[in-house]
Image (cartoon, coloured by chain):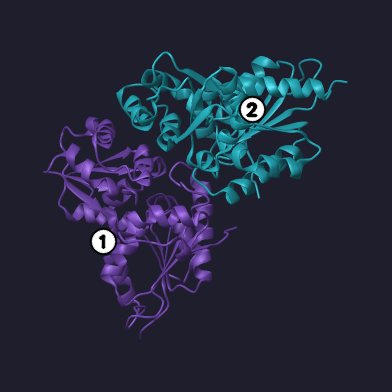
Chain colours: A cyan, B purple
Amino acid sequence: MADPRPIGVFDSGVGGLSVVAALEAALPAESIVYLGDTARLPYGTKSPQTVERYALSAARALVAEGVKMVVIACNTASAVALDAVRRALAPVPVVGVVEPGAAAAVATGARRVLVLATEGTIRGGAYERAIAHMAPDVEVVGVACPLFVALAEEGWTCGEIPVQIARHYLQAHLSPRPDAIVLGCTHFPLLSGVVAEVAGPAVRLVDSAETTARRISAELHATGLAAARRGSGGLVLLATDGAERFARVGSRFLARPIGARDVRIVNLP
Amino acid sequence: MADPRPIGVFDSGVGGLSVVAALEAALPAESIVYLGDTARLPYGTKSPQTVERYALSAARALVAEGVKMVVIACNTASAVALDAVRRALAPVPVVGVVEPGAAAAVATGARRVLVLATEGTIRGGAYERAIAHMAPDVEVVGVACPLFVALAEEGWTCGEIPVQIARHYLQAHLSPRPDAIVLGCTHFPLLSGVVAEVAGPAVRLVDSAETTARRISAELHATGLAAARRGSGGLVLLATDGAERFARVGSRFLARPIGARDVRIVNLP
């Protein structure tokens, strides 16, 4: 049984396009509808109640587009709204990025893990819980890195100032040295170079995009929802605001050019 | 004729509380209702269409609270939505912060002015137009400083990294030296120390909060809308999300403590 319907992916903005890039590489037969809630970004500084409300409306908009599965490609929304979105969308399967990211961290064999994320993700403690569930002996330290979002959005991802900002956030947590650092926000892979420079070569950096893509692949095949062959859909891009900015900043995360005319603006309730 | 109704003030977040502080100092008899649209902040990276929609709903919510005047204490919204809000609210008077800020810059006698602001404010060119209207010979250079918003929100307003970020934004525009620098975002007065350190002591820093308060005072007295004596209203704080964060970050802008229980959460359409 092959299912040609697209996979729906949403994030507060364009960061989740890094998950789309991993999905396209892992599952070239699948079509994808991506929704960036750019009119209400960021989610990372907002309350759990508001993030849940926004996540529900984004997820429902994807279901209205006819998707067969919803991927919450936003760590903050995955951390605070995964259960609510699953309940609201059942029986449509919903995959978040926190659990795959936590699994990837555990798979490195790390005994001490730093999680770099937004204020909202850290406050909720979702990575700590997910890692404790899989590997109770692993020590997990969450570090909110709010300026990283702005740096990544501006494309200011190398040079002395980003390195100093990374050092400011990390230095208190590098002794004893962590074995792995989770880039627990879809924006942060753009800053992996500066994080690696500050943390040193012995620390493994963990990005949830590829692990999430593998999880989606496993779930699609287990449930008979995988597409049989390359469909005509390709990638559809939706945003709630700012097609020009979406295209410009999003190109960095998708790692290929996006045209502003390829982005359809939609309104969410 | 004295009018005891409150003045309504809104911003995308808490930055406009610096205008409230100036208003309280200039007009101690007035009551104020402040609305921070924290569920949808920031405005500075969003499209003019979306900023206008948000500004209209915030302004209408203040009118529904019974205010006698609306102050748009957000440079981005003043820059792109002042006319639309005026048309929608007439005959309720509406005051923005761009024109008072431009007037304050011109009043310094500066021949060359830098305007530091958000991407949205700079893109719209509102300061350039306002200054050109008053003083056509003044040279105006707009500089978008997106990371300043995150620094001010985090309270990271002194030290080597903020100074280096300020230098990064300003250095290309310091020769020839400007006579004045407009802090064209309600968040930026918190960074006046680092801007002054980079620009040097000969450059005047212009903050629109006090000029806006004087403009409001003049307009209230000219229209007979001023309050006669201190009312019972004081300051009412409304936000669309996150009372705890509003209180914590807002205290920095109001320059006195705010309790989370003093912030009423409201929903905007």
Query: What is the x, y in percent for residue A98?
Result: 60, 31
Q: Count up the numbered dots.
A: 2
Most extreme residue toward the front is A137
The kind of residue tagged 1 is Glu
Q: As drawn, is A216 to the left or to the right of A226?
A: left
Mark 2 highlights which residue? A134
Q: Foreground residue, B237 or B99?
A: B237
Of tags 2 and 1, which is closer to the observer? 2
Residue B113 is at least partly visible in this image: no
Q: CA distance from mark 2 to mark 1?
A: 56 Å
Q: Chain of mark 2?
A: A
Mark 1 highlights which residue? B210
Q: Are marks 2 and 1 on the same chain?
A: no
Packing grade of label 2 (10 A; few <14, some 14-19, many >=20) is some
Q: As drawn, is B34 to the left or to the right of B186?
A: right
Which quadrant of the figure has residue B175? top left
Most extreme residue toward the left is B202
The kind of residue tagged 2 is Met
Residue B71 is at least partly visible in this image: yes
Query: What is the x, y in percent for residue A25?
Result: 65, 15
